[in-house]
Image (tube, rainbow, N blue to C red):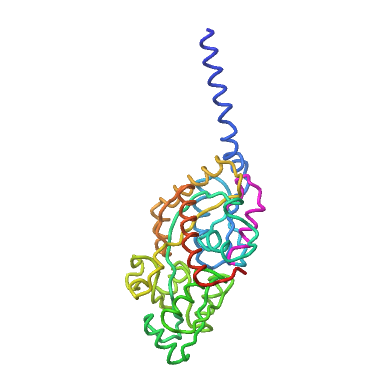
Amino acid sequence: MRSKLLKMRRHLLAALALAPLALAAGPLWAQGKTVKILVGFPAGGGTDAIARLLAEKLKDELGATVIVENKPGAGGQLAAQALKAAPADGSTFFISHDHTISVLPLVAKNPGFDPAKDFQPVAGFASFVNAFAVSPGTPARSLAEYVAWVKAAGQGKGAVGVPAPASTPEFMVKLLGGQYQLDLVPAPYRGSAPMLNDMLGNQINAGIGSVPDFIENHKAGRIRMVAVGGSARQATLPEVPTLAELGMAGFEDLPYYGFFAPAGTPKAAVDAFAGALAKAVAQPEVKARLTALGLAVEFMDAGALAAREQAYSKRWAEIIRKSGFTPL
């Protein structure tokens, strides 16, 4: 009898020890509260489309209401600041690519957040490449033709749209200008959606952004991607050469997409969200839709995402330093 009571006591203590972890992840969502996904760019852009696709699937996996909240401005800086200020209770997550997390802290004197201290990596789910695209009114069908056109029609001067100031695409504009002896000026926008609108309207002749930003209009023939980053051609764009093929080495590192939470968010809540994300992106329908958007789906747990972010930040810190850029 005594041994039976001791055994029951041990089981009870074990259950009590696990209870806080279960409560941290479960009740927040089970009680009907909302999980919010912050997006640092306007509705209609590539990141917004990805966030809304995943939110729909995460809703089913978490058994909770999942909403997308756009906080555009300053290359995702406003959304990142909102994440820092959000309660660390598993109710708020931030979907971001490399710019806000890895690059922005390198180019802003006071971004208002420190990813290493204020954020907690949750999980990554994809990589992608940036692309150089030309507007429909631009006659060029290749990067070489664009270079020749700028030299002839623009006397070597041209403006190239970028989705955010002091972003990876902005530095790419400068490097491309140096490579081809052109006076290319980056024209920063508040996100890819307004940049794309101006490209479609021939208000600007070219732009650099992510493949997910451009792919729908490229496939429809409304704009033309003429070069992509990465070490190999994209499966969804076999006709578009890489910059490396065209003699522009240095753009082989792949930007990433991931989710982040406020620092101090309970591990159980982070693990539950990461697990739901892993299940969502493994669904054939979701993987196919993300691939069609120009993403290479690759799930990364929190540790792998943190390592990827640190390596990418280190790589671009060197590029930015060599460019002579002064943090704003």
Measuring from the top left, give residue 9's x and y in whole percent: 56, 17
Towards the viewer: 186 or 29: 186
Span of residues in magenta: 75-93
Residue 237 falls left or right of residue 312: left
Q: Residue 146's image quarter?
A: bottom left
Residue 222 falls left or right of residue 102: left
Towards the viewer: 20 or 117: 117
Measuring from the top left, give residue 94's x and y in whole percent: 57, 55
Q: What residue is rendered at 54% in x and 79% in y?
A: 198
For residue 222, say whether it is visible.
Answer: no
Q: Quadrant of the C terminus?
A: bottom right
Q: Is residue 87 magenta?
A: yes
For residue 146, say whether it is visible.
Answer: yes
Q: Is residue 13 magenta?
A: no
Q: What residue is rendered at 55% in x and 26% in y?
A: 15
Q: Residue 241's image quarter?
A: bottom left
